[in-house]
Amino acid sequence: MKSIRAITLFSFIVYGLWLMTPPVEAAERFFEIKAKKFSYTPNIITVNRGDTVKIRLLSEDVHHGFFVDGYGIKTSAHPGMEGSLKFIADKAGRYTVRCSVTCGEFHPYMVGYLVVGPNSRFWLYAAIVLVIGIGSILTLRVKKING
């Protein structure tokens, strides 16, 4: 009986670890960001953890930069030209985007945000594994009591 319980528990642990691996179907997200008069449009970018993010920065007035705190990546664009960057959003959280080029008197207020949401599939799979594990334990206890 103990060997069956150990095999069952081991099977569920292995299955749970397999389910909790990040999905391979991460999306590729593209954003065109316009920088003008101390603001970004759009100023909030929302992606999921694991997504590949491509950003094209367009400056409409002066030389502007685009630096993502927490990721340490940056690009810049002169008027009429574009800057670009590509990265994998592998850290969930809210990150401040700042202009990395002094562009005028209100330069310190030129900020935006990158919001990297959690991988919702991970939490779904974790909940399923938890329910299966609890169900297995309860089933074994009921069999032990009845048998």
Image (cartoon, rainbow, N blue to C red):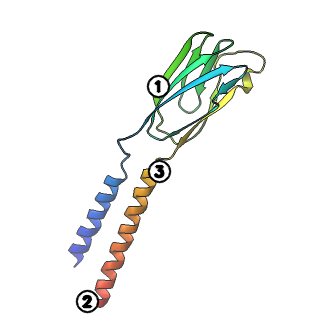
Residue corresponding to mark 3: 120
The x and y percentages for residue 51 are: 45, 37
Q: Do the residues labelled 3 and 2 touch (CB within 8 Å)?
A: no
Q: What's the residue type where badge 3 is placed?
A: Ser
Judge whether 8 appears above or below 54 on screen.
below
> Is 2 situated left or right of 95 in this image?
left
Q: Do the residues labelled 2 and 1 touch (CB within 8 Å)?
A: no
Disc 2 secondary structure class: loop
Q: Distance between the residues labelled 3 and 2?
A: 40 Å
Q: In which image quadrant can residue 110 be found?
A: top right
Residue corresponding to mark 1: 86
Q: What's the residue type where badge 1 is placed?
A: Lys
Residue beneath the point at 44% across and 39% down: 50
> Is 67 situated left or right of 30 in this image?
right
The x and y percentages for residue 103 are: 71, 15
* Badge 3 or badge 2: first in the primary sequence: 3
Q: Which mark is residue 147?
A: 2
Q: Which quadrant is the C terminus positioned in?
A: bottom left
Q: What's the residue type where badge 2 is placed?
A: Gly
